[in-house]
Image (tube, rainbow, N blue to C red):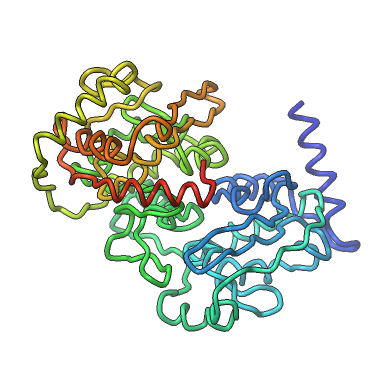
Amino acid sequence: MRASWLGGVLLAAVSAVPSGAQSPPYPQIERGRYLAEVGDCVACHTAPAGAAFAGGLGLKTPFGTIYSGNLTPDPVSGLGQWTQDDFWHALHDGIDRAGAHLYPAMPYAWTTRATRDDVDAIFAYLRTLPPASRARPADDLFPPLNMRVSVEGWNLLFFQPGVFKPDPAKSEAWNRGAYLVNGLGHCGGCHTRLNALGAAEGSVALQGGTLDGWYAPNITGDRAVGLGGWSAPEIVAYLKTGRNARAIATGPMADVVMHSTQFMTGADLSAIATYLTSLPGSGAAPAAPSVEPRILDAGMAIYRDNCAGCHGAHGQGAPELIPTLPGDGAVVGADPTSMLHLILRGGTANHTQAAPSDPGMPAFDWKLTDAQVAALATFLRASWGNRASPVSAGTVADLRKTLREDGTD
């Protein structure tokens, strides 16, 4: 089966290269396939029921909807007429083949750090894909952002192109992890707070960010709300399988694990763990929350009736099956959005090759009022050593409305 697949790739590679051109060597193609998985390119460049990498997925932003491009070698709607240089300028400079600016929804602010060899390898791999004809729908953005020239101003303010430069004072593993996290992996695209213009705020890099009805938690070495208490093997297990004794990946992170990190090598995952745990957090220990006793009592009662059967009387959960609530990033994070999302809509952990089961949590939006969800969330954020701020019923109501309007699962 493996041999058949390899033969298919090589045949596709030959057929995708223009007549008279030399096909790229197989090792470069295979390396490009791996790097495309590192970058999770398929997630944004595949529409529902569409061919892989053929684009057309609508990416919702605060400024409207942007549709992803076709990365297959289709000569009309894809990359069939693109050269290596064209592709390099797209990932490194945010400029397409026609010289137009790409919108920052394409994470060129991160992929600019990728080396030329790595970018060329990705391009070689994409050239082996079956051509799929799929025209990209027109973007639906608010004026003046519907004019791509507006991106020039954004780039002047927030974009500095440049390939990653290793830090000679750091280890090889640290530098590899920094390259993956801040480059093709573009982890900061979700795990860093964005400013009003949609640019990542470097001063709080990887300290958590909110988007699409989810909160991507702090992944620095912060011991209170980050990964400072996690061991390297625990981080590797989470990225490889989507779960460990502390947490289970849900929401967008479950998709990242399913389509990207589960396929990464152990060495690369260990390098990511080395880098992330070296990063200092905010350094500020959260203050003990001030919560009305009646709210805590109400939240405790709701927890016992609805949650303790799975999560345990003290939130201990079940290793690699049900998350542990004390210290959980979704519970104690600065933003409770992910926890509220899960309480309202439930969630399922995507299965992986190493962990084929997909444990899930039921939705409670049909059962609990906004005030009850807020009391439950407040109880969770203030119990078992957790020291996070209370949640208001208004916050729950706003998220419930957003999820209903967006049709978010």
Residue at image coords 27%, 45%: 393
Q: Position of residue 170 (x, y in %)?
A: 30, 54
Residue at image coords 68%, 46%: 48
Please identify the quarter of the rendering in which residue 167 is found. bottom left
| Image: 192 above or below 309 | below
| 193 to the left or right of 130 | left
| Image: 405 above or below 140 | above
Residue sitting farthest toward the top:
309
Residue at image coords 72%, 63%: 136
Q: Position of residue 222 (x, y in %)?
A: 22, 46
| Image: 84 above or below 242 | below
Please identify the quarter of the rendering in which residue 166 is found. bottom left
| 222 to the left or right of 63 | left
Front residue of 184/254: it is 254
Front residue of 400/340: it is 400
| Image: 43 above or below 85 | above
Front residue of 176/383: it is 383
Residue sitting farthest toward the right:
19
Front residue of 387/342: it is 342
Q: Work out which quarter of the rendered image holds the N terminus and state it.
A: top right
Residue at image coords 29%, 53%: 207
Number of marks in the image?
A: 0
Q: Position of residue 119 (x, y in %)?
A: 60, 60
| 213 to the left or right of 201 | right
Please identify the quarter of the rendering in which residue 82 is found. bottom right
